[in-house]
Image (cartoon, rainbow, N blue to C red):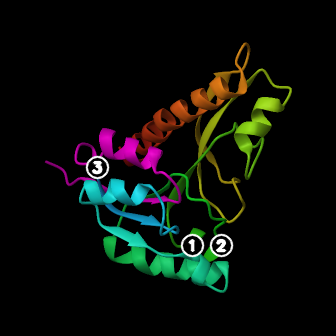
Amino acid sequence: MPKRKKIAVLFSGQGSNFAHIVTTLHKQDLEIAVALTNNPQAGGIEIARDNAIPLEIIDSKVYESREAFDTAVVERLAPYDVDLTVLAGFMRILTPVFTEQVKSINLHPSLLPRHKGLKAIERSYEDAYPTGGVSVHWVTSELDGGEIILQKEVEKSGLGFEEYYAEVRAIEKVALEEAIREILH
């Protein structure tokens, strides 16, 4: 039996996408070798603990620069020797210190190159296009600018913002799971 591929999952918030990866892929198609957060209060911490996944907490607020924080992240990830790092709601703009050393993908809640950065779901809902959606892309030092791996669309017609938001959040999980499987198989 071939050795399971190993991933790292980085998150900043509730960890709903992290939880989906745990449920659908962990110990089945792959192993989550480590979870890492920059937020000591992140909800995703409990998900890691409940599933006995090694956890690294690096409070980004205590670092004097993005580069210093990214150096700490790279150093903490190195011993786990992962095949892929997955940014699942990791709310940090990463510098070349990270992006040039760590093979990683990011989930973004818009059809890139539209609506890079924050408030992408809101901006996507309000734009003139008939669809919005999500993108999974390779991480580079350009914010939400790496090569797109896959995208999934959501029709906006007839949806209020809350319904659209819920559709985007649901399809994020599917897109992230598919992208991870595609890359590692």
**Element carrying mark 1:** helix
Residue under pointer 3: 30
Provide residue 132's location: percent of width, then percent of height.
Answer: 71, 29
Crowd around label 1: few <14 · some 14–19 · many ≥20 (10 Å): many
Please identify the residue farthest to the left as the structure is shown.
1
**Amino acid type for the residue under numbered disc 1:** Phe
Residue at left offset 22%, top offset 48% = 27
Cα–Cα gap, marks 1 and 2:
6 Å
Q: Which residues are magenta?
A: 1-29
Amino acid marked by disc 2 = Thr
The crowding category of the residue bearing disc 3, from other C-alpha atoms within 10 Å (few below 14, some 14 to 19, many at least 20), is: many
Q: Which residue is mark 1?
A: 98
Query: In this orientation, which residue lies closer to the viewer: 180 or 60?
Result: 60
Question: Can see residue 167?
Answer: yes
User: How busy is the neighbourhood of tag 2: few (under 14 within 10 Å), some, or many (20 plus)?
Assistant: some
Q: Which amino acid type is marked by label 3?
A: Leu
Q: Quadrant of residue 181?
A: top left
Report the front residue among 54 and 179. 54
Q: Is residue 78 left or right of residue 42?
A: left
Q: Where does label 2 land, which residue?
A: 95
- Element type where label 2 sits in the image: loop
